[in-house]
Image (cartoon, rainbow, N blue to C red):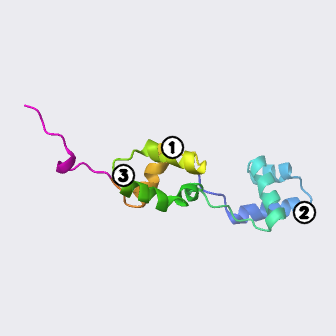
Amino acid sequence: MTKALSIDLRERVITAVEGGLSRRAAAERFGVAVSSAIKWVDRWRRTGDVRPRPQGGDYRSQRIEAHAAEILALVAERPDVTLAEIALHLDERHGLKVADSTVWRLLDRHGMTFKKNRARQRTATG
């Protein structure tokens, strides 16, 4: 993702629009995309803020984090439970549809890893 344009530029575009220029004319004058000028002015009028919104980040993990204790208890009860079984459990019990990778990320965040060890390895045949 590219870096957000400066607050100074945003303020100059907004000032020009408030001074009578159209959003398209202000965008052309300052060399920014028309869609950017429209969004900046709209946001300024709604919130009074010209700063760019935060980029990136996680917006959805809180859905599965709400069930973290239940999932961790399920893993503790059945250490051989699969990611697909956990996802199915969440769907059946709570109507929460998540991908196996989402379950994996939750377990990873909580330090649950499933590494191979000698006790679980099969014996090699000669």
Magenta stretch in the rendered image: 114-126
Which quadrant: the C terminus? top left
Residue 70 spot, x, y in % from top left: 48, 59
User: Which quadrant would residue 97 be assigned to in this image?
Assistant: top right
Residue 79 spot, x, y in % from top left: 34, 52
Q: How far apart are marks 3 and 1 (CA)?
A: 15 Å
Q: Residue drawn at (37%, 58%), measured in percent from left and top?
A: 76
Q: Residue drawn at (78%, 54%), measured in percent from left and top?
A: 39
Q: Residue 78 carries which label?
A: 3
Residue corresponding to mark 1: 88
Q: Which of marks 1 and 2 is nearer the N terminus?
A: 2
Query: Contact, CB < 8 Å: mark 3 with mark 1?
Result: no
Amino acid type for the residue under numbered disc 2: Gly
Q: Which of 39 and 114 is in front in this view?
A: 114
Q: Residue drawn at (34%, 54%), measured in percent from left and top?
A: 113
Residue corresponding to mark 2: 19
Query: Contact, CB < 8 Å: mark 1 with mark 2?
Result: no
Q: Is mark 3 on a helix, strand or loop?
A: loop
Residue 77 is a magenta residue = no
Residue 99 spot, x, y in % from top left: 51, 43
